Image: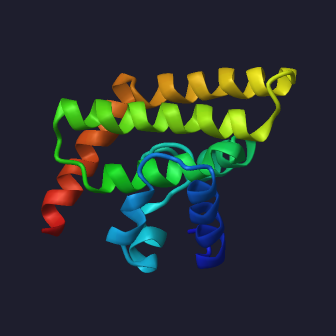
Amino acid sequence: METKEKLDELMTRAVEAELDGVELFAQFSIDDIQREYNGIGPEWMPAEIRDRLSGHLELFAPAALIHDLRYSRSNGSRFDFNFANMEFGGNCVKLANDAHPWYSWRRYAARAAAQVAFDCVRSQAGWIAWCEASRKSFNRE
C-alpha cells in the first residue's frame, strides 16, 4: 500500500502532465485512492512482482493510478474496458514524451515500454482483471 504522500506526488505528476482522467481524483477520498491503487500490474499478480514492475516502470505510475481508479468503477462492459485501456496507453505515451526530449533515444524506448504496458492491459489477462473489478464494484454498492 502506497503512502498518502506518494499518492499525492503521483496525482500532482498526473495533473502537471495533463493526463486524461485526472478528474477522477475528485471522486475519491485519499483513503479510497490508497485502497484502490496497487501499483503496476493486476491485483491477482503477486505483490512482489507488482512491486518490481512498479519500480521498473515508475515513469508510468501516474497513468497506472488513473487506470486503477477506472478499474475500481468497472461496470463490466467491453466499451468501458477499452476506454480505460486506451486512456492508460495514451497517458503512458504522454509521460514518455514529457520525460525525454524528442531527440533522445530514451523517449522512444519509453514509448516502446508504454506500448508493451498497453498491450498487457488490453489482453485477456486485462479483461479478467476488469471483470473481477466489476464484481468487486457491484458488491460494494
Kindly tell me whether residue 43 is visible in this rendering: no
Q: Is residue 87 above or below residue 108?
A: below
Q: Quadrant of the N terminus?
A: bottom right
Q: Nearer the viewer, residue 51 or 121?
A: 121
Residue at image position (58%, 23%) is: 116
Residue at image position (60%, 72%) is: 8
Residue at image position (39%, 26%) is: 122
Say left or right for 100 vs 43: right
Say left or right for 140 vs 114: left
- Give x and y (percent) for residue 125: 38, 29
Q: Is residue 64 above or below residue 9?
A: above
How was the colour assigned to the protein in this rendering? rainbow
- Give x and y (percent) for residue 119: 49, 22
- Give x and y (percent) for residue 41: 52, 43
Kindly tell me whether residue 39 is visible in this rendering: yes
Q: Nearer the viewer, residue 82 or 55?
A: 82
Q: Quadrant of the C terminus?
A: bottom left
Say left or right for 129 vs 22: left
Q: Residue furthest right?
A: 104
